[in-house]
Amino acid sequence: DTGVSQNPRHKITKRGQNVTFRCDPISEHNRLYWYRQTLGQGPEFLTYFQNEAQLEKSRLLSDRFSAERPKGSFSTLEIQRTEQGDSAMYLCASSWDRGFGNEKLFFGSGTQLSVL
Amino acid sequence: DQQVKQNSPSLSVQEGRISILNCDYTNSMFDYFLWYKKYPAEGPTFLISISSIKDKNEDGRFTVFLNKSAKHLSLHIVPSQPGDSAVYFCAASAWRGGSQGNLIFGKGTKLSVKP
């Protein structure tokens, strides 16, 4: 399977704990995105990487959130001191940016985070 | 403010009939539009897209229409099948700074196709 892979699929944590999610993009894709989706809403952009460089961060991404993409391959999203409002589906997507737009994002199955 | 709006939270259609899902946008800089389908507990799956230089794009049973003057696009599914039952998201992006910007999504429309 060469799709976008996310681990874990589900994560239950207590408020105040740190959590880390992993995303493995489609291998030839140079862009990697993180989105968050809550019930009844569409996916909301958090941040994206072009290769290993983090090029944009949404204002939704508080300083408790940090994302990395070492060596431009897999990515991790860490949330420190989790709050109940962080409960959501965290989606990773990748794409191939050829420099002339019209890129399609391919999403993973997401990590469902529940903060108790 | 919502830049991409899907005003119908749900739509119910009989199998074999046409499903029409609508989407409005407010940002005139958007130049690329996509539709994604999402089943429960899965990530969104790309369905069809359209560039702002076109007004129609067709792929099998799926056709997307773009009306730039009205800032409106629609997805037509003909004929509808029970397997089409899912949440459909409209998304848009704008070319800026020499690259395509991130996708902005609507809230989705839940389509139910009844046998």
Image: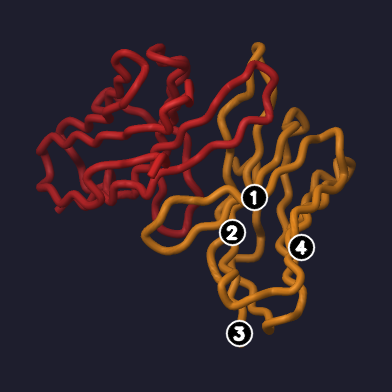
Judging from the image, mark 1 belongs to the subunit labelled: B
Q: Residues within 10 Å of mark 3 (few under 14, many from 20)?
A: some
CB under 8 Å between discs 3 and 1: no
Q: How far, Cα to Cα, is label 4 from label 1?
A: 11 Å
Secondary structure at numbered mark 1: strand
Q: Residues within 10 Å of mark 4 (few under 14, many from 20)?
A: some
Decide which of tag 4 and tag 1 comes sooner along the chain. Answer: 1
Residue B105 lies in quadrant: top right
Which residue carries the number 2 mark?
A: B88
Which quarter of the image is occupied by the N terminus of chain A? top left
Along the line of sight, the residue nearer the viewer: B113 or A37 = B113
Chain colored red: A
Q: Is residue A57 left or right of residue A64?
A: right
Which residue carries the number 1 mark?
A: B35
* The disc label shown at residue A32, or none: none
Above or below for A108 versus B78: above
Q: Residues within 10 Å of mark 2 (few under 14, many from 20)?
A: many
Q: How far, Cα to Cα, is label 3 from label 1?
A: 22 Å
Which residue carries the number 4 mark?
A: B76
Above or below for A56 versus A108: above
Secondary structure at numbered mark 4: strand
Chain colored orange: B
